Image: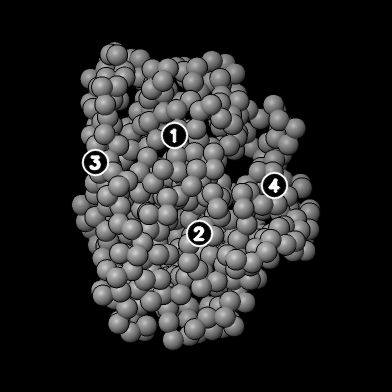
Amino acid sequence: MRVHRCLAAVLIVPALTLLVTRQSVTAAAADRPNFVILMTDDQRWDAMSCAGNPILRTPNMDRIAAEGARFLNMFVTNSLCAPSRATLLTGLYSHSHGVIDNKRRPLPPAIPILSDYLRAAGYQVVFCGKSHVRGALRDRQWDYYFGYVGQGRYLNPIIREGVNGQDRQYQGYMDDIVTGKAIEWIKRGRDKSRPFCLFLWFKAPHRSWIRARRHHDLFRTVVIPKPVTYDEDLKGYPGKPAAFVEATNKIGDFPDVRSLEFVKDYYATIVAVDENIGRLLRVLEEEGIDQDTCVIHTGDNGFFLGEWRAFDKRFMHEPSIRVPLLIRYPRLVKPGTVRDEMVLNVDIAPTVLELAGLSVPDRMHGRSLVPLLAGKQVEWRKDWLYEYFEYPGPHSVRKHRGIRTERWKLIHYYEVDQFELYDLQNDPLERFNLAYDPQYADLKQRLLRRIDELRRETGDVPGEQGAARESNK
């Protein structure tokens, strides 16, 4: 993991342009892939039929997996919209790029984002859809832009075409409109002599879930089963701390989330996304560029669908932090590849840069997935750092940090000094909190020390109140 020492050390975009241009702008376009980076909002890892979902059918996401690679253990390092999106774009943890929450914090102009690196290397860069960062990425340079501020709305949305254009209303369903504009650019707007990177970021399946009209009756007769842990928070289930139990994210407490029926609408919006992915894949074929295009599909965070009667995300539990990652690139990836290494959203930018023939900056915290995509067996990360900062805020989720290893997960709500510790091997549903069991006291301390180490490795240097000392144990 690379060290990012301080914000002041980040390379400024103009200098970046000179550096990257020398490296690669002379490379032939035929030697560099196109990229399509798809992102959904709040899609958890198992909200796809290729991941075994018994209700939802996603044939086009399934196609990307079947013709490429599916990563079983893809996680976000801060399960919240704006921080996660900024992390994908920068390859940095949120404590380094500064977008630590959804409170309209800007992504500093001095920090290059993935499109800046690619554009400096001769790529056409296009953004269509939802960025959720302050300014909606209109302060960056794009060859084509079609985006909106904030959450946007599903029906008859307000969108701007061109960073210097005017916001105006479009008639129809948000993700249909945005995908249509991306397709139009691929067919008629691009310079076919140069490679491109298209960011197509959907609104769905974000709350509140408004279906496309064509899906009005979808799933109406389906029964949504209760998760195993649906009632456990109400019973004071073993060891769940107040920081978790007292969060205001419970089904039944909100007028638009009265019962598990909301899951049907959540799924229906994902079906619309999948249909739009199918539209895009067909156009890549029609244009004769499907074999030369790397298609990446992921999400910005996961989502509780009734576990402990919760919805939303933010917490470090598996439904919240685990997201899809599908990558199709025929030049490199063997169809049907499945990888189980722990990969992170900080890894996307390094992966794209390496595939584009560019050097990965040392300041990035992630690792390129190219060796895994190529089917190689390599030494990989054994643990990683999680962080969440938005408190006070929606759903009253306390600030916390944590560590996830291949077997263990420790969550520390450091302002109130509360813990959760799970043995994921024997307790994958995170039902039994071991943090206060004396048998696990030494393990808990080792994991707390490792949190401090990971913070230092990623430039978030603990002070006198570092994680291990904050425990007071």
For marks 3 and 1, the one nearer the N-term is: 1
Q: Nearer the viewer, mark 2 or mark 3?
A: 2
Q: Is residue 140 above or below residue 4?
A: below
Of label 2 and label 4, which has the lower sequence position?
Answer: 2
| Crowd tier of the residue under label 2, counting other residues whose Cα lies within 10 Å: few below 14, some 14–19, many 20 or above | few
Bin the neighbour count of mark 3 within 10 Å (Cα to Cα): few under 14, some 14-19, many 20 and up: some
Check disc 4 and report the residue beneath it: 209
Farthest residue in the left direction? 379
Task: From the viewer's side, name the closer residue of 25 and 350.
Answer: 25
Q: Are marks 4 and 3 in contact (CB under 8 Å)?
A: no
How many angstroms separate mark 2 from mark 4 (CA)? 30 Å
Tell me, yes or no, if residue 31 can be seen here.
Answer: yes
Q: Position of residue 100 (x, y in %)?
A: 45, 39
Give above or below for 300 relative to 188. above
In this rendering, the answer to whether 98 lies above or below 326 is above
Query: Nearer the N terminus, badge 1 or badge 4?
Result: 4
Disc 3 marks a residue whose amino acid type is: Glu
- Picture disc at residue 175: none
Q: Nearer the viewer, mark 1 or mark 2?
A: 2
Q: Amino acid at mark 4?
A: Trp
* Residue tagged 2: 139
Identity of the amino acid at label 2?
Answer: Asp
| Residue 367 x %, y % | 29, 54
Task: Tell me what residue is drawn at x 58 percent, y 65 percent.
Answer: 163
Residue placed under numbered mark 1 in the picture: 388
Label 3, on which residue?
457
- Where is residue 9 drawn, in percent x and y? 27, 49
Mark 1 and mark 2: span between their CA atoms? 26 Å
Residue drawn 37% across and 37% down?
Answer: 386
